[in-house]
Amino acid sequence: MAMTNPKRNWWKEAVVYQIYPRSFRDSNGDGIGDLRGIIEKLDYIQSLGVDVVWLNPIYQSPNDDNGYDISDYRDIMAQFGTIADFEAMLAGMHQRGIKLIMDLVVNHSSDEHEWFRQSRRSRDNPYRDYYYWWPAEKGKPPYRWSFFDVNSEAWQFDPPTNAYYLHYFSIKQPDLNWENPQVRREVYDLMRFWLDKGIDGFRIDVAAFFSKELPFREIPE
């Protein structure tokens, strides 16, 4: 029997408009798009019949990978604006009936994130297991492929602790260890931070890479 009134989920059937903030609209003439620029165009976005804006990363980042290398998940890159600008943008969207989802980039962090700064200090640091490490005394790590490495090698030697760390993307994007329950709690906490501000959800980046086959075994290069 056909359903005459099926339950509709906005996140499955909405018209989604992706905004890459750096190139969307520059409000202050510095050559970089920003949150104020998005605010200026909200009426235009509404006129398109958009239900949801998907916002690419605006978090604090050294920009090795266009904002996908995040050094602080709870702050906004100064080039884009401030938390107050973000709150004004979000309020403007909601006033127009537009939902906001943000990119959630948690397969990896920036190597400038405090978690990694701590992790690389010593092998017994409480943050050590936030990332994947291979001790150099065990020899060269089993080959893993990296998207950005010039040699397609996902293990990077790090002298301070005589060990290699895993990076499926750039060497400045060490992979987070999702096998560590504390990492998961950290991610849930940072998600709650933005949800408490009123955003409507997340687009999860490269989720297929979260899980690694452990222990690392040799595979053909």
Image (cartoon, rainbow, N blue to C red):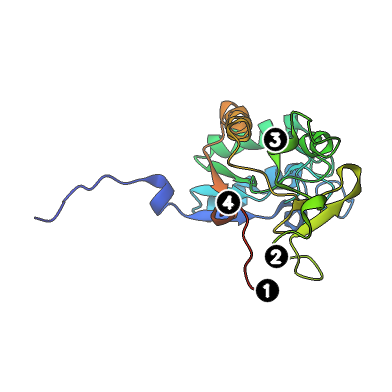
Residue located 36% across and 45% down the image: 9
* SS assignment at label 4: loop
Res 221 label: 1
Question: Which numbered dot is residue 143?
Answer: 2
In primary-sequence order, the first of circles 1 and 3 is 3
* Camera-side residue of 89 and 144: 144
Q: Which residue is label 4 attached to?
A: 214
Can the viewer see residue 170?
A: no
Amino acid on which disc 2 is placed: Tyr
Furthest residue in direction top, as rendered = 196
Residue bearing the label numbered 3: 86
Calculate the distance from the C-alpha at mark 1 to the C-alpha at mark 3: 45 Å
Of circles 2 and 3, the one toward us is 2
Q: Earlier in the sequence, mark 1 or mark 4?
A: 4
Image coordinates for residue 185, horizontal then vertical, percent: 59, 30
Residue 214 percent coordinates (x, y) = 58, 51
- Determine the CA span between mark 2 and mark 4: 13 Å
Sequence order check: which comes first, mark 3 or mark 4?
3
Q: Earlier in the sequence, mark 2 or mark 1?
A: 2
Q: Quadrant of residue 83?
A: top right
Q: Secondary structure at mark 1?
A: loop
